[in-house]
């Protein structure tokens, strides 16, 4: 029965640590005995190109592909990518969005403008929008590079998996010298939703 399958879409641009976050998420889900399918799409360039990862998990999953309007959660590492992919969320789905803006090449070349009203447009949709200053929070943890793990921590607050499980897979996946920074970044993200629920 496919009704228990959950769909998570992670989007952003190259160089933001999307694949790392997706790998940790997939490994945590597999460790808790879910059937997990993952599909990655990399942008035209390693840095700056659009990147997305689709992860589906449940009792039995047959395809890694998430259809439009079917995602339960989207983690967006950048605002324009959040807007671009927001149509994949189901009604009432949750969009966790980093407040950072990264100008794509057409904007940098002066051929297009970065939309000024992204947050307003997202708020008009039938979704739950959670804005996170992930870069700033990651710096508080010790490194701006851990913004991806801050966002992963936010998502983890929605999933029925203990924090220690997440920590164990973060420890396995990140460079040894950054383990404590990444665990702290995860805890900051995780704590945001706990505070929001109080």
Image (cartoon, rainbow, N blue to C red):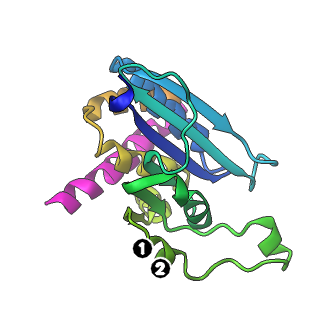
Where is 152 relative to 173, above or below?
below
The C terminus lies in quadrant: bottom left
C-alpha gap between disc 1 and disc 2: 5 Å
Q: Residue at x 53, y 52 (%)?
A: 88
The answer to whether any part of residue 27 appears in the image is yes
In the image, 18 versus 11, the foreground residue is 11
For disc 1, the marked residue is: 123
- What mark, if any, has residue 14 been given in the picture? none
| Rendering quarter of residue 166 | top left
Horizontal and vertical percent position of residue 11: 58, 50
Q: Is residue 14 left or right of residue 1?
A: right
Give, as a single range, the part of the protein colored magenta.
175-198
Q: Residue at x 47, y 32 (%)?
A: 56
For disc 2, the marked residue is: 120
Q: Residue at x 69, y 39 (%)?
A: 41
The answer to whether any part of residue 176 appears in the image is no
Horizontal and vertical percent position of residue 23: 53, 31
| Rendering quarter of residue 171 | top left
Q: Magenta stretch containing residue 176, yes or no?
A: yes
Q: Do the numbered discs 1 and 2 sit on residues whose CB atoms are within 8 Å?
A: yes
Q: Residue at x 38, y 65 (%)?
A: 126
């Amino acid at each position: 029965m496919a009704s228990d399958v959950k769909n998570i879409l992670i989007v952003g641009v190259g160089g933001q640590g999307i694949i790392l976050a997706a790998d940790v998420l997939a490994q945590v889900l597999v460790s808790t005995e879910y059937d997990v399918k993952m599909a990655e799409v990399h942008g035209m360039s390693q840095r700056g190109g659009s990147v997305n990862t689709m992860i589906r998990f449940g009792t039995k999953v047959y395809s890694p592909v998430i259809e439009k309007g079917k995602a339960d959660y989207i983690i967006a590492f950048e605002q324009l990518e959040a807007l671009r992919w927001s149509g994949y969320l189901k009604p009432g789905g949750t969009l966790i969005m980093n407040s950072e803006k990264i100008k794509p090449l057409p904007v940098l070349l002066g051929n297009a403008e970065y939309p000024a009203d992204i947050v307003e447009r997202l708020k008009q949709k039938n979704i739950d929008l959670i804005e996170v200053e992930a870069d700033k929070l990651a710096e508080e943890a010790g490194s701006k590079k851990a913004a991806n793990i801050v966002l992963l921590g936010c998502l983890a607050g929605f999933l029925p998996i203990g924090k220690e499980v997440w920590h164990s897979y973060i420890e396995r996946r990140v460079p040894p010298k950054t383990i404590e920074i990444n665990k702290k970044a995860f805890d900051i993200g995780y704590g945001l939703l706990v505070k929001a629920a109080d």
